[in-house]
Amino acid sequence: MSASGSKLAIYGAIAANLVIAASKFTASFFTGSSAMLSEGIHSAVDSTNGLLLLYGIKRSKIPADLKHSFGYGKEVYFWSFVVALLIFALGGGIAIYEGILHLIQPEPITNIKINYIVLGIAFFVEGASLIVALKEFSGSVTLRGLLKRIRRSKDAAGFAVIIEDLGAMVGLVVAFLGVFIGDYFNIVYADGVASIIIGLILTSMAVILATETKGLLLGESLRDTEVAQIEEILAKHQGIDNYGLIRSIHFGPQSVLVAIDVEFSDKYSMDALEHEIVRIETEIQNLLPHVDKVYLEAKNFN
């Protein structure tokens, strides 16, 4: 997903979550449902998270300076990690707290139809937001192989929106079941249990998102297939006698540094060697456009 694609998905998610949060809080006020209150908090937190992700994307575009010579690309990873913390603390924590309160002091839900109407609207709006995010992220709306794509992706903002939307869809189903079971079977504890389950779903989402962004913050390398492509470029140059480990690190979704120690043939003059290094660096960047920094260092391995 490109930066523009990420921003489109985030704008869609923010708009959806603002509408949904307002409707859920309204339903919770008139019905007394803790599950709806938890879902309202969830949507409100997601709206704030979207703004933080947009801020991270904006910060990541700041040009390199003396303080950060490789740029500010990792800002988006940092703010994605902050989003994970907010989901865990505000979303999951408050939902579990509200659920426990309603288990201690259970109250029957009133005006039940309002909950069903709001949940139906929320499911439709949230589903539309998820479809937009999936299309921007993978070009399709299928969930097949999505987890693998998320693990391979370096676009923290993109997969953060998808993880949030997926969690929201599951949370809506749980909220519906809590309201329905409480209403149909007259079980006053169902609503509180649903709120706790929603909280556990949110904390699980937060752990997944934090785990994925942690690796990016620490500095992930290129994928094995991309390293193999660079090795193919090096192998076809007859003037290269040997080369060392291909070191790489992501500074952002579209910013990667690659550094390689290369042993060149003695046949090269100084000018010819400089020309060959530039040629190899250009070939790597043309093949992998997200690799914006390539450093080849001539070295003797003997």
Image (tube, rainbow, N blue to C red):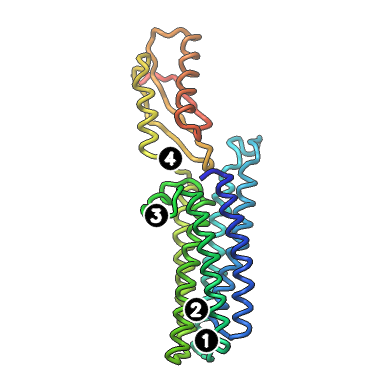
Q: Amino acid at mark 4?
A: Ser
Tag 4, which secondary structure? Answer: loop
Instruction: Return the x and y of residue 291 as percentages of the image width and height.
Output: 49, 33
Horizontal side of 19 relative to 189 (left or right) equals right
Q: Amino acid at mark 2?
A: Ser
In the rendered structure, the answer to whether residue 31 lies left or right of residue 286 reads right
Q: Position of residue 243 (x, y in %)?
A: 37, 24
Which is more foreground, mark 3 or mark 4? Answer: 3
Q: Are marks 4 and 1 in contact (CB under 8 Å)?
A: no
What amino acid is labelled 1 in the image?
A: His
Pointers 1 and 3 in contact (C-beta within 8 Å): no
Q: Do the residues under discs 2 and 3 have CB atoms within 8 angstroms?
A: no
> Residue at 48% across / 67% down in the picture?
169
Q: Pick whichever, 150 or 67, lies toward us.
A: 150
> In the rendered structure, are the residues bearing label 1 and label 2 in contact, judged by CB atoms less than 8 Å apart?
yes
Q: CA distance from mark 2 to mark 4?
A: 40 Å
Q: Which residue is mark 2?
A: 195
Nearer-the-camera pick, 248 or 14: 14
Q: Is residue 14 above or below residue 238?
A: below
Read off the residue under disc 1: 102
Q: Which residue is mark 3?
A: 147
Picture quadrant where residue 87 is located: bottom right
User: Alpha-carbon distance for marks 4 and 1?
Assistant: 47 Å
Tell me, yes or no, whether the two marked residues, 2 and 4, touch with CB atoms within 8 Å. Answer: no
Q: Earlier in the sequence, mark 3 or mark 4?
A: 3
Query: Which secondary structure lies at badge 2?
Result: helix
Residue on which disc 4 sits: 221
Tell me the tag on residue 19: none
Q: Rounded to the nearest whole Å, what is the CA distance between mark 1 and mark 3?
A: 34 Å
Mark toward the start of the polypeptide (2 vs 4): 2
